[in-house]
Structures are given as structure tokens and as C-alpha cells.
Image (spheres, helix red, strand yellow):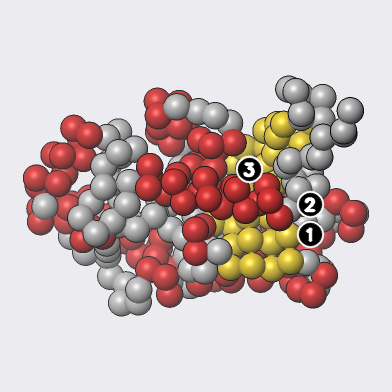
Amino acid sequence: MLERRQKWPDRIWIVRHGQSAGNVARDMAEAARLHLIDIATRDVDVPLSPLGERQAIALGQWFGQMPPSEQPSIVLFSPYIRARETAQLILESAGIAREDVTYVADERLREKEFGILDRLTTHGIRQKYPELSEQRAHVGKFYFRPPGGESWCDVILRLRSAIDTIVREYAGERVLIVGHQVIVNCFRYLLERMDEQQILDVDRAADVPNCSVTSYEFDPTRGKNGKLVPRLSNFVVPLEETGTPITMEPDMPAAPKS
């Protein structure tokens, strides 16, 4: 009988980017009950805040404490600046040379697209597009797609393609993925085989902390051919140990949880 080839990476770490300038601007706008988040750049160009840089460095130091044989060998990241900067800082502070890993920007890991709701606060959405606010409340965030934007289902569809690539190209590797809050939760939906209610319960319980780690390890004894097993969920000990403030602001726009 032919021996079955391992399908999955040995380990996957999924990390939300460090606090961004957009997170800070969004919090200020919400606190002042403004309709628009005061940030001039495209969402793709929003950088890390100074605190976000510290968070990425603290997480990189945690990876740096691992033996080289256990550190990431593949680094996949959203092309958005805040995610790219987070990935770079993690490698630099871990002491991992770029040339020693496969380092790939993957547009399928980008932030959920908000369409015409981009840069609007909760108050702004209700004021400018009350009918969309009502529709979202009726349909729910999992299926609601704003004009020009994406639903969670749309994000999940592109992540299914990303998982196909990971399985095809990175079996047996150690894969670090740097993305966004919705990316973390949608990977959890797929890898943990959740349904709509389960992942919305996870989302409702708490926002994903910046530079937190959700991880999976391959267990050859599980199932017929082995499977990925959850190990860490929103793990922030690397930040706590260095005294780095933990932040968990939602991404833009700040829609009410449902």
C-alpha cells in the first residue's frame, strides 16, 4: 500500500497586524461621534502606529526564542501596508533573514473590502445609508455585502483558494500568515469547520487583539490521514511579557456586532 503524503503544513500561525493609524483614527472618530474617520490614505496604504510597531517587535522576539527548526519557514502576508510592516518587523526582531524563508504577499489575505461604507463610522453609516444599516441588521454580517464591498462569505471564498495553495505548495512547512481581523476569524471558520453561528459567536465575544496569535499544528494521529489541531487562540502572552500594551480595536468601518 502506498504511504499517504502529508497534506497540511506542520504548523500554521495566523496573526493580525499590529495596531494601525486607521485603528487609532477610528477610535477617535467613534468617541467624538463623527460620521467620517479622519484618514486621508487608501485603506491599503494605512501604516502601523508607533504602538503597532512595538507590538510587532514584541511578537517577533517571541518567534526569535524558538529553535530555528521550529521557526516559520513560509511567511504569507496581506499586501496592505500595515500587514506588510508587521511581517517585516516580526522577521527582523526574530533574527530571521528574509532569504531564509519563502516570503510572499498574497492579495487573497487582504482586508475585507467595505465598498461605499469605507471610512464611515457607525454613526455615519446610520446617517448616510440608513437603509443599508437596516439591511445589514436583517441579513447579518456574515452574508451582508455593502455595494462595492464584500461579505464575510466573499472573504471565505478567497481564503478557500489560499488554503488550496497552502496545501499544494507548503505541506510539511511552518507557515506564518499575517492578515487582518476578519482574515483571522474566517481562517478559523474554515480550519475549525465552524458554521455561521459559531464564528459569529467568536466574533461577538471579543475583537481579535493586534499581533495576537492563533495557531494550528498537524497531528498525524487525528482522523484518517491526520489533521490540523487548534493550539492557540488570540494568544497575546508575547506582548504581555514585554509590557507592550494590548489593543483590539475593530477594523474600519465600525459596524455594530450582530
Q: Which residue is mark 1?
A: 73
Question: Distance of mark 2 from mark 3, alpha carbons?
Answer: 17 Å
Q: Tell me if mark 3 has few (under 14), some (14-19) or many (20+) residues whose alpha carbon lies within 10 angstroms of its own.
A: many
Q: Tell me if mark 1 has few (under 14), some (14-19) or many (20+) residues whose alpha carbon lies within 10 angstroms of its own.
A: some
Q: Which residue is mark 3?
A: 214
Which amino acid type corresponds to the residue marked 1 in the rendered image? Ser
Find residue 95 and report its horizontal and vertical position in percent.
82, 69
Q: Please report contact status of discs 1 and 2: CB closer than 8 Å, yes or no.
A: yes
Whichever of callouts 2 and 3 sits on the residue coming sooner in the sequence is 2
Question: Distance of mark 1 from mark 2, alpha carbons?
Answer: 6 Å
Q: Which residue is mark 2?
A: 173
Task: Locate the N terminus by quadrant.
Answer: top right
- The answer to which quarter of the image holds residue 102 is bottom right
Residue at image position (22%, 34%) is: 139
Find residue 57 and report its horizontal and vertical position in percent.
68, 65
Relative to 47, is 164 on the left or the right?
A: right
Which amino acid type corresponds to the residue marked 2 in the rendered image? Glu
Residue at image position (54%, 29%) is: 193
Relative to 236, is 131 on the left or the right?
A: left
Q: Tell me if mark 2 has few (under 14), some (14-19) or many (20+) residues whose alpha carbon lies within 10 angstroms of its own.
A: some
Question: Distance of mark 3 from mark 1, alpha carbons?
Answer: 17 Å
* Vertical arrangement, residue 155 with respect to residue 37, above or below: above
Whichever of callouts 3 and 1 sits on the residue coming sooner in the sequence is 1
